Amino acid sequence: MLLHINPACLFKLLHGFPPWIMPTDGNLGGKNVQMGKPGHREGATMHVKKYLLKCLHRLQKGPGYTYKELLVWYCDNTNTHGPKRIICEGPKKKAMWFLLTLLFTALVCWQWGNFIRTYLSWEVSVSLSVGFKTMDFPAVTICNASPFKYSKVKHLLKDLDELMEAVLERILAPELSHANATRTLNSSIWNHTPLVLIDERNPHHPVILDLFGDNHNGLTNSSASEKICNAHGCKMAMRLCSLNGTQCTFRNFTSATQAVTEWYSLQATNIFAQVPQQELVEMSYPGEQMILACLFGAEPCNYRNFTSIFYPHYGNCYIFNWGMTEKALPSANPGTEFGLKLILDIGQEDYVPFLTSTAGVRLMLHEQRSYPFIRDEGIYAMSGTETSIGVLVDKLQRMGEPYSPCTVNGSEVPVQNFYSDYNTTYSIQACLRSCFQDHMIHSCKCGHYLYPLPRGEKYCNNRDFPDWAHCYSDLQMSVAQRETCIGMCKESCNDTQYKMTISMADWPSEASEDWIFHVLSQERDQSTNITLSRKGIVKLNIYFQEFNYRTIEESAANNLVWLLSNLGGQFGFWMGGSVLCLIEFGEIIIDFVWITIINLVALAKSLRQRRAQASYSGPPPTVAELVEAHTNFGFQPDTAPRSPNTGPYPNEQALPIPGTPPPNYDSLRLQPLDVIESDSEGDAI
């Protein structure tokens, strides 16, 4: 149902336009409009006015000018079944169809909300696919279990080793070592972080006794120490103090073996942190001594084919096929004959006795150009054995934001990567350790020896940072610190994992060990005697089991096509509608907004006219007064209240002011609507 606009209403609306749109003279609806300025501006103003009038009229020309008429028009013309029945049926069925339409509309909105919420949850589905192709051989990192050769670091650990021997004597035979335990020892090492005995049989009053007789609870003799050590509930702990010993905490252990190992490792870290890294590299095992034989497929190799890096836990480590300066090596075929074969000499006879309690080789398989976190992800190979490692490849591909919190290269991770000097790819392990080192620097004012150090900072040691051990222990045990780093770091979106199948056998056998050790000794140091033994030799075979690789890939569980399909299906099932019905509904919303704007404009004009009429105190001027004011510029209308006895102009002696000219009645003529609706450029408005 279409309603035509009243021309008078259109004129009232146009009266509110700015002066540059309205003409200064002439006929508003005629074809010849006299403009105030000639030339190009006159034509431009006429065209602007023409198109604005057309747009205004077409916007006002809607399905109705009341909300009721608009609603009736929509229900009568929409393609949705329910509203039509509300208009066409009788009163009873009209009510029934109204309730049904309202109910099904609520069901559709509820279903739509569920589907949209499911879509915005960004769930993923995981697909597993198997492929077959020639693959690049993984990078192989090997490290000796002992970081340094004892013969080269013995001078650094002399005082610590003597103190460690005294501690062991005190634990094993306190009655024999009490008299001479502290006479020749370096007490400065012990005073920073001593080992104590704690009897926790009475939780409210624990008994704490220093191993060397520095009793804090009144017990000073060795018999008391022996009694506590043999008592049920006795524990060994490490005392960590700060602020000149005024604030102390205890790190408890269930075994004396764990306690002395951790204590020695902490003290050794303090010593090695004060030594330049280049000197530490020279104290570790060189590649030419450790790698006795190498064979990749049918091609021989040696220690020069390995890249050396210094890893604080294991000293010098060597990486084969890292891909930093050369192209990654492909594997020709699966099987042992096409893999990497190594014979390694770990030199177990020169291990640091108290620092390393494990003998063997630590190895790890990883991607090219990735940093090997071998302490967390590596495996051990025993000495005196041949270890065969069959490799299977899993490739992980994650979707990324917003489906999963992963990163491609770590550029958006708010953690400075301290491993960037190695020019390696991003990994979550590098992020977590960099985050911990950053917290260590901010909390303890120094960096830990086991992690890379940013420029301008120093490693922690007892000489420069006396409280660092207490600070490090608190930070290491802090749950808030771990949660903060885990929240800041992200997994890599693309990752490759190597699944290993490990098998071992004694090597060499008793029948062949003589000639094998003779040959290896001759090749290593040109000796005619056997200088190698079973406890120092490790043989490794690393190969692809098969060229099948698995790809674990994430994909969106609910994509946009799924969402639109379900929204349309629910709308069609409950309402019998389609996308065009939604467009119709959008149309009525636009009409509703436009009718509201028209009503607000009309209300504003009405209020403005009422205020203008209220400001005029006297009666409106007559036609005669308007004509007189138009012809006589000295005419002034009488605004005072008139009485029957007074004349029309009582104040004729006063100086009059010009009046208002009469209106131009030609401007009230309007063309019919069909002329205004003409789209041709030649039609005048």
Image (spheres, rainbow, N blue to C red):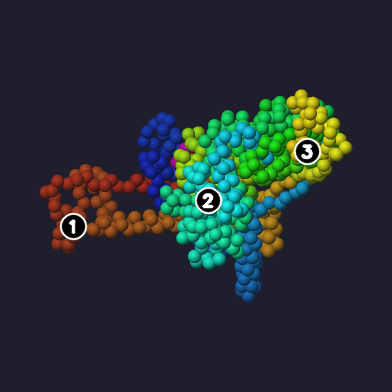
| Sequence-first tag of 2 and 1 | 2
| Residue 658: image location, x then y, percent | 22, 45
Instruction: Estimate the spatial distance between the alpha carbons at disc 2 and disc 1, rounded to whole Å.
Output: 127 Å
Instruction: Estimate the spatial distance between the alpha carbons at disc 3 and disc 1, rounded to whole Å.
Output: 130 Å
What residue lies at 37% left-to-right and 33% top-to-bottom? 37
At label 1, the amino acid type is Ala
Secondary structure of the residue carrying tag 3 is helix
Up-down: is 216 above or below 435?
Answer: below
Task: Please give left or right for residue 304 compared with residue 461 in the image.
Answer: right
At label 2, the amino acid type is Ala
Q: Is residue 169 visible?
A: yes
Per the rendered image, the range of residues in magenta is: 47-51
At label 3, the amino acid type is Arg
**Which dot marks residue 109?**
none
| Residue 160: image location, x then y, percent | 55, 42
Up-down: is 681 above or below 326?
Answer: below
**Which dot marks residue 640?**
1
Q: Nearer the viewer, residue 373 or 362?
A: 362
What residue lies at 54% left-to-right and 39% top-to-bottom? 271
Secondary structure of the residue carrying tag 2 is loop
Q: Residue furthest top?
A: 526
